[in-house]
Image: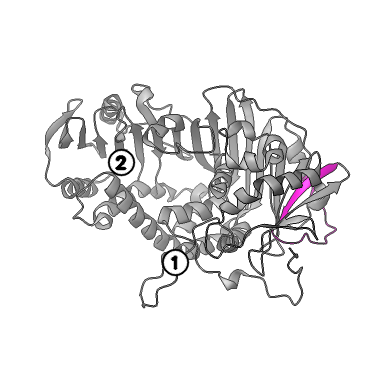
Amino acid sequence: MLVRELFLVALVGLGLLTSLAQAGADSVAIQYHFAGTAGFAGNTNFALAQRLCSLPSSLEFRQLALGRLAGVFWRDLNFWPGADPVASLGPVLDDLLAVESVGSFGGASKEHLDFVLAAHLDPARTQAWRQTLVTALGGPGESFQVAGFPATRWNRSSNDFYWLAQLRDWTVAGRGNDLQPLSTEYLQEIQKNGRPAPALSETWVQGEINWPRLATWGFCASSPFKLARTSFQVAAVGGRFRVTGTIAYPEEVPWSAKPWHIPKDLVHEPLMSFTAARDLTPFFTPGASLPRFFPNAFDNQFCCWAQRDLVFQTYAAWPTPDGPEALRILQQSFLPDLNSLLTKPRDEKIFWSPKTTEMVWPKSSLLIPTLSSLRRRDGDYLLAKLFPLPDSRRPAPEGLWKQIERADDLVYYDWELTGPRLQQWRVLCEFLPVLPAAPPPSLAKSKQAPPFAVVDSWLGGLTPFLGNTATEIKRSGPSQLSVARTTPFVFTSFELLWLSHWLTETPAGPVNTNLLPMAKMTGPGLPSR
């Protein structure tokens, strides 16, 4: 889907777990080390994060998200269906969010993921984990040993079982036998050093995801992007998060640094965000929709920007050798394919307007996206608009262009004012097919707020606190990208929007009129067909 691919473009910016031995590494798909939100206390670098996580709307969102995930994991792990997943597994997930933990996931079986997980728990919470497994697996289990350490095992089959061990002040749980070398190492390190891995200092979380390996179990098997091994580290310095990482491909990626062509005279203050990328097609799988629909944008380059005056002031442009001809080809060859993505009963179709020579999507009386060609001094562009361009004489700061043009190896750049941009996305997602639409509201009265209201309240609570976020992705080798981001709260505005709805399986709600600008008496009108 186009929206999913756009999200993956935004997310392409997410160090190795060098503290763990490489035994069994070929079987591992995911490794992580997480300091837990309890580590925020007393650390001024996490002061803002601690404040945001303590908001009433954050606590309500956390309960909603953990409840949904508890149900998903309970079902996927084939736990006893007669139990309440939220009551049983919800507190375990809450522990994993709060305390320090280290984990590895993988194995040889294609039927299920084996794992080994160590969490820093007190005896009461260890007993609660044990009781959760008793409930989930229908019995107290049997005595067992893992690398010579006492444990309890619950058998499913000869190659599928769960186990739990307690050593010093760590609880270690696992599934299966494929990651036994890591299980042994975790327990031996706890016995020797009091912890399964060296303590994190200013780092909050670090990990590695082997996406090609993870696709064995169906995760991202249909991704439009080429799968790679991704490592990341999230640290906090001076009250801001710094996200760094690498994306390592199994073979060389034929990327080239094309000279930047940005329609600078169209980009004006007051800016809310700006994104630029070039030669992204080599990072997509063959046949992916975005490069197929918009080859000039992804074979060459594109930029997107948003302005602060109105919610709908979002634009995108990309250079093309012959703008009118490129638009004609898009209209004749791909317009039916684009319309096939608009499957909801109330979705208006995109049409060609001969009068204005542009493609028009009459989404609503407030929002009318268009795609047109534009000739500038430095060549032709295709220009996508959600709203007419403003008549502004305030150019974007020269420092923005220097930030982009100074590096020959820059693949992707994104800057935004995350809070204000998040407020814009909260409105745009209710008009555009970014998220599934909410079902009609029930007439029955309920004391609980609907899920989309909980999500929107959480996002609204974050908005006043989030400032500048900048992300750079550079080519650091023939088969490798490096990622660097500075941000107040780890994620960009669109990532926060998408992840919050995904975590809670919540569609977009009805339009929040409080976020809309005051109505105007005049407007651009609807182009004629």
The residue under the point 82% across, 49% down is 374
Per the rendered image, the range of residues in magenta is 379-400
The answer to whether residue 368 is magenta is no
Q: Amino acid at mark 1?
A: Pro
* In this view, the mark in front (1 or 2): 1
Residue 393 in magenta?
Answer: yes
Q: Answer above or below: position of 146 versus 485.
A: above
Q: Residue at x 65, y 57 (%)?
A: 350
Give how far across and how far down residue 129 sits, in percent.
22, 47
x, y percent for residue 370? 71, 57
Residue 439 numbered mark, or none: 1
Q: Badge 2 is on which residue?
A: 119
Q: Amino acid at mark 2?
A: Ala
Q: Residue 216 location, x and y as percent? A: 38, 32
Pointer 1 or 2: first along the chain: 2
Q: Position of residue 171 (x, y in %)?
A: 25, 39
